[in-house]
Image: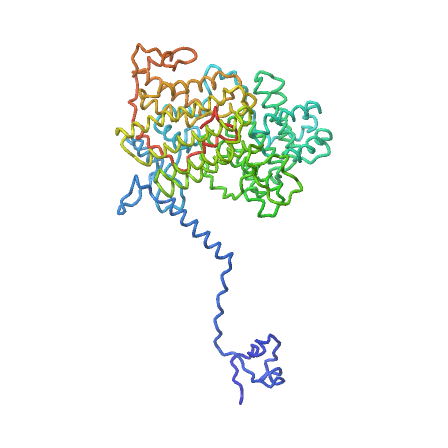
């Protein structure tokens, strides 16, 4: 019987199954030799089955679903301001909002459509006439409400001692500087003896609070660079000059009028810029060059408060991501020592980036980096060996890493609180997270501290400052979420208690700065002005000038102003300070208009250094605006509020923008 064929171009079924060549005969020679029927496939081909989904595919799909759920959760509207389902969401542009003459504080925030793919809050920030942008919720709303403060943002400081402040350093040398080719790197180095002294100063005053290097492995390379500067790679030169710059910064803080130290400081800055250029930092960053950037940018805040430092910090973050620091080293099977060094460096860059943003009223979403880098181990350098093969375990005692870990733990908890706020408006959940943070800090670190040891004393005081500021922030969010009438007794008592807590947090920072035992680290503490706390306290004093605790609040505010404006070692506080000066003047005018004339300003503890509020009383009645209720400001304490808890890379205790 003749075998029917439908497609002579194809192999027969048996040859196809055996995966052998078929001569396509009728029958084919292979089937004839095996004495089996030779059949060819019919006109219709069987549909191929879809390939089985792999684990990678399933993981990718789950990740996509999680991101979609998170985006939908971020778009959900808060229950305290529900929107009718039959009414489409309104979208108000900045131009339209500015054109409404009667728009009050409640309409100052731009409403975002629920269909938006972003998870941002309704706060779009404030854009000043000079081009400066601020999206910190409290500050942006104050600026929208107080028109006379808008012109003060970014204007030069006008206080009497402003001329005594040293000129800020320029920071464009790392990116572009035509003079780099004309500089000799070795000519910028100090003498070997001076370099040794600078190294010792760095170890005692900078390394304890900016712990990003492993001294046992770095020390030989540093001394090799000091002895034979022409035999080390450029990234080691970067680290060497950063160490010199950090040590000179501490010395300049002790003696701000010493021109020789300041000239050395500028010379070391040029050395960093030239070394970064020679190491091709922008194209080929290394761990050492990033360590140099972390030290340099931290110490630079004593000499420059402009946005250039914040911009360079963002550049360093991108460079760190380009070499995978935001991914934990264990994923790449790196040695334990290298994993720990990478963790230390990432967490310093990561936490200080958010903290520096506060100096300029910029918010940074912590989850934006999508990092899975673990916290570094709580261990001393001498117990971290290059030959180690097993993962490093933290030690239950105070170590060289404890100070930095306190900062990292508080900063890490910020995201958790923000997530809890997004998922639930139950204040008990947020308070529980705060209590867990307190317990965690005490059990891991604080209980092992010794108040007689300077760095441990600083860490313990810093922990108290950070937790107090976190608690103030949490209470602000709770009050905003409740949305209760400010005239109610409960709300009045809550706002009064919040003022007391904020004033206490400010006072804790002042105590930390003035502690004589911590004088060696004052170079770092003076770089932080507590802008968040000061802004809230002064606004409260404008709204409720006669509440309890106002005398204590005024005392702490004026102590802070006294230090910023009259301490010669205190650097320029930056562009936000003139705005605070005007806000303080307004609060004082309002207070003078409410207190009895027989009450002397000196008796209430709010006298200015140069005497009682010159000119303020005369202007108190004329043009005095009726203070609005605090709830009318529509303070949006969302999860995107800046991480003032970090206090950042330093012990941002005292002067911090808080």
- Tally of numbered discs: 0
The answer to whether 336 appears left or right of 431 in the picture is: right
Whole-percent x, y for residue 477 in the image? 36, 34
Q: Quadrant of residue 13?
A: bottom right
Quarter of the picture containing the C terminus is top left
**14 above or below 323?**
below
605 is higher (above) or lower (below) than 43: above
Residue 614 appears anywhere in the view = no
Across and down, in percent, residue 463 comes to 48, 30
**628 sits to left or right of 395:** left
Measuring from the top left, give residue 108's x and y in whole percent: 33, 33
- What residue is at 39 percent from the left and 26 percent from the top? 502
x, y percent for residue 188: 67, 26
- Look at the picture and state if 141 lies above or below 49: above
In the picture, residue 361 is in which quadrant?
top left
Q: Residue at x 31, y 23 (%)?
A: 544
| Residue farthest along the bottom direction in this orientation | 1
Relative horizontal placement of residue 464, taking residue 299 as reference (left or right): left
* Nearer-the-camera pick, 264 or 415: 415
**Residue 20 appears in the figure:** yes
Q: Is residue 316 left or right of residue 504?
A: right
């Amino acid at each position: 019987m003749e075998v029917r064929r439908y497609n002579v171009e194809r192999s027969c079924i048996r040859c196809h199954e055996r995966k052998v060549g078929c001569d396509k005969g009728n029958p084919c020679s292979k089937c004839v030799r095996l004495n089996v029927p030779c059949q060819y496939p019919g006109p219709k081909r069987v549909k191929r089955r879809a390939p089985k989904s792999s684990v990678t595919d399933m993981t990718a799909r789950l990740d996509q679903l999680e991101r979609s759920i998170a985006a939908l959760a971020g778009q959900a509207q808060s229950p305290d301001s529900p929107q009718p389902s039959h009414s489409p969401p309104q979208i108000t542009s900045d131009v339209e909002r500015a054109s409404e003459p009667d728009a009050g504080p409640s309409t100052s925030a731009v409403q975002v459509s629920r269909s938006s793919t972003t998870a941002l809050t309704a706060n779009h920030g404030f854009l000043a006439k000079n081009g400066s942008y601020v999206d910190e919720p409290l500050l942006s709303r104050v600026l929208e409400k107080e028109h006379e403060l808008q012109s003060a943002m970014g204007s030069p400081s006008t206080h009497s001692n402003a001329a005594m402040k040293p000129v800020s350093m320029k920071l464009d040398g790392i990116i572009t500087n035509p003079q780099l080719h004309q500089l000799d790197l070795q000519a910028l180095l100090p003498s070997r003896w001076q370099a040794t002294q600078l190294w010792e100063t760095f170890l005692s005053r900078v390394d304890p609070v900016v712990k990003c290097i492993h001294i046992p492995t770095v020390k030989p390379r540093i001394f090799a660079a000091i002895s034979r500067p022409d035999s080390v790679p450029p990234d080691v030169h970067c680290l060497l000059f950063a160490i010199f710059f950090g040590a000179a910064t501490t010395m300049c803080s002790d003696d701000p009028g010493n021109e020789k130290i300041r000239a050395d400081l500028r010379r070391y800055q040029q050395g960093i810029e030239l070394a970064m250029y020679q190491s091709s930092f922008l194209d080929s960053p290394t761990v050492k060059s990033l360590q140099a950037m972390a030290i340099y940018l931290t110490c630079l805040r004593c000499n420059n408060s402009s946005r250039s430092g914040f911009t360079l910090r963002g550049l360093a973050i991108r460079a760190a991501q380009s070499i995978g620091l935001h991914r934990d080293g264990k994923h790449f099977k790196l040695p334990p020592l290298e994993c720990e060094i990478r963790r230390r460096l990432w967490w310093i860059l990561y936490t200080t980036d958010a903290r520096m943003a506060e100096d300029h009223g910029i918010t940074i979403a912590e989850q934006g980096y999508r990092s899975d880098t673990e916290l570094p181990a709580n261990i001393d350098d001498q117990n971290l060996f290059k030959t180690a093969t097993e993962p490093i375990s933290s030690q239950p005692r105070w170590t060289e890493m404890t100070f930095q870990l306190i900062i990292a733990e508080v900063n890490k908890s910020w995201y958790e609180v923000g997530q809890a706020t997004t998922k639930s408006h139950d204040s008990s959940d947020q308070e529980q997270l705060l209590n867990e943070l307190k317990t965690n800090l005490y059990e891991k670190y604080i209980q092992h501290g010794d108040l007689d040891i300077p760095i441990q004393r600083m860490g313990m005081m810093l922990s108290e400052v950070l937790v107090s500021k976190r608690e103030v922030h949490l209470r602000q969010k709770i009050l905003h979420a409740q949305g209760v009438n400010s005239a109610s007794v409960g709300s009045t008592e809550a706002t009064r208690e919040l003022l007391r807590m904020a004033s206490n947090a400010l006072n804790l920072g002042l105590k930390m700065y003035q502690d004589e035992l911590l004088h060696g680290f004052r170079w770092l503490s003076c770089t932080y002005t507590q802008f968040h706390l000061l802004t809230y306290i002064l606004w409260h004093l404008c709204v409720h000038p006669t509440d309890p605790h106002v005398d204590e609040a005024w005392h702490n505010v004026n102590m802070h102003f006294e230090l910023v404006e009259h301490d010669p070692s205190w650097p320029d506080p930056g562009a936000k300070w003139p705005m605070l000066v005007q806000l303080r003047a307004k609060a004082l005018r309002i207070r003078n208009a409410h207190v009895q004339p027989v009450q002397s300003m000196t008796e209430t503890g709010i006298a200015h250094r140069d005497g009682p509020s010159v000119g303020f009383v005369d202007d108190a009645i004329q043009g005095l605006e009726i203070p609005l209720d605090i709830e009318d400001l529509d303070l949006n304490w969302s999860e995107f509020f800046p991480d003032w808890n970090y206090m950042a890379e330093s012990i941002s205790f005292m002067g911090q923008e808080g």
